[in-house]
Amino acid sequence: MSSSPQNELHKELKSAVAELCRSFPDAYWRDLDAKRAYPEEFVQALTQAGYMATLIPEEYGGAGLGVTEAATILEEVHRSGGNAAACHAQMYIMGTLLRHGSEEQKKQYLPSLARGELRLQAFGVSEPTTGSDTTQMKTLAQRKGDKYVVKGQKIWISRAEHSDLMLLVARTTPVEHVKKRSEGLSVLLVDLRNAPGLTIRPIRTMMNHATTEVFFDDVEVPAENLIGREGQGFRYLLDGLNAERILIASECIGDGRWFLERACRYAQQRIVFGRAIGQNQGIQFPLARAYANVEAAALMVAHAAQLFDSQQPCGAQANMAKLLAADASWESANAAVQTHGGFGFAEEYDIERKFRETRLYQVAPVSTNLILAYIAEHVLGLPRSY
Ligand SMILES: Cc1cc2nc3c(=O)[nH]c(=O)nc-3n(C[C@H](O)[C@H](O)[C@H](O)COP(=O)(O)OP(=O)(O)OC[C@H]3O[C@@H](n4cnc5c(N)ncnc54)[C@H](O)[C@@H]3O)c2cc1C
């Protein structure tokens, strides 16, 4: 079978990203994990190589490629043992600006993002008292003359300390004053470099993730930083979620493949009772099953990405891709720990680190239950459960 130009491009991308990742071996990630430190050099390298600008159209200085290519890049980072969570958000956050921003805003921000001079890494949605019920968010952005004054609190805002801008979703009309709860939300671009009244506090988590809580105490944001129309923010938010889900799913596929490669290598080498442990079906079968599930999930990720890139509806496929890929990576992680026995818990084997990292995707950016509720309601036509 002859390879299409697109397949060739993906092969080239994969091997170029793999080459870049070889400069950031296990020890690099292990050391940062112990210190809970940000992978500054890795993010710089990815940015300088132009990968962070994959989805930015060529007219604004980016590569003008699709979610399929962005997914190829992120998958390879994870397959190499790294973690793209330190910077992946810029790829999909930028989409809100691209789809709903004014031409002036796009010209102002996209070329600098593409050149790596500006970082748009922070996405402010989650709030401590709201949880998955996003429309109940309370952070208020009140219009006063030519600015918005923002008051409230966000939580789990990753990379806020390593970003110049934050895409903030806030209420411009309190929930009591709207007909539908999804109305009255707006998207603002907050310049984190110049925001008196803003406090960012890091949250130490079970893995190295640079996440924070952010307090807004009458933070002033110029009205010209509103993206799209006031009150339409929920629609813009939903619009960006499919790309986010597909890209996170691709990272899970990379994790799954990394776990299986490491586990199979170890299963060949570890001799117990005079034979390789990989000769036992009790070791083989969980790995074989996890492999089948990773490969099946990868097909769904590719399918969702292809629909997204051809501008077709892909809500169901993006959600299923995220669900299946997160399950498959978690299954692979579990099988890898079991295969490694006690060494699965030793830091120097990196299995326990990746195990902690991949666990996140059962919860964020959307929890497994909420995806199941989406499929039940929107695909199967069952009554809404929440
Ligand atoms: C490390 C990390 C990084 C994150 N980064 C960001 C970020 O950059 N920006 C951002 O805005 N957010 C971020 N998040 C937040 C993340 O999106 C939320 O944690 C996630 O959406 C779940 O919301 P919650 O934690 O409030 O859980 P809750 O909504 O309180 O849910 C708790 C549990 O209850 C279940 N549940 C809730 N309602 C239902 C229901 N109706 N039916 C069945 N089960 C239900 C959920 O599935 C979950 O298992 C991050 C979170 C983490 C942990």
Image (cartoon, grey):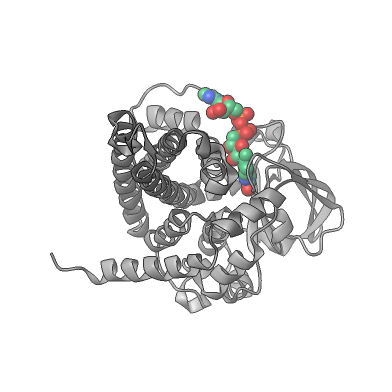
Give the residue drawn at x 61%, y 52%.
Answer: 30
**379 or 277, which lies in front?**
277
Q: Is residue 173 visible?
A: yes
In the rendered image, residue 123, in percent from the top left (x then y), is placed at 63, 51
Q: Quadrant of residue 71?
A: bottom left
Is 134 drawn above or below residue 90 in the view shown? above
Image quadrant, ligand 1: top right
Q: Is residue 366 visible?
A: no
Give the residue drawn at x 54%, y 60%.
Answer: 100
Give the residue drawn at x 41%, y 59%.
Answer: 67
Decide if residue 352 is on the left or right side of residue 222: left
**156 or 347, which lies in front?**
347
Q: Quadrant of residue 144?
A: bottom right
In the rendered image, residue 241, in percent from the top left (x then y), is placed at 49, 47
In the rendered image, residue 36, in percent from the top left (x then y), is placed at 70, 50
In the rendered image, residue 111, in percent from the top left (x then y), is placed at 58, 76
Decide if residue 53 is on the left or right side of residue 224: left
Residue lying farthest left? 1
Residue lying farthest front? 274
Is 101 drawn above or below residue 371 in the view shown? below
Is 37 drawn above or below residue 345 in the view shown? below
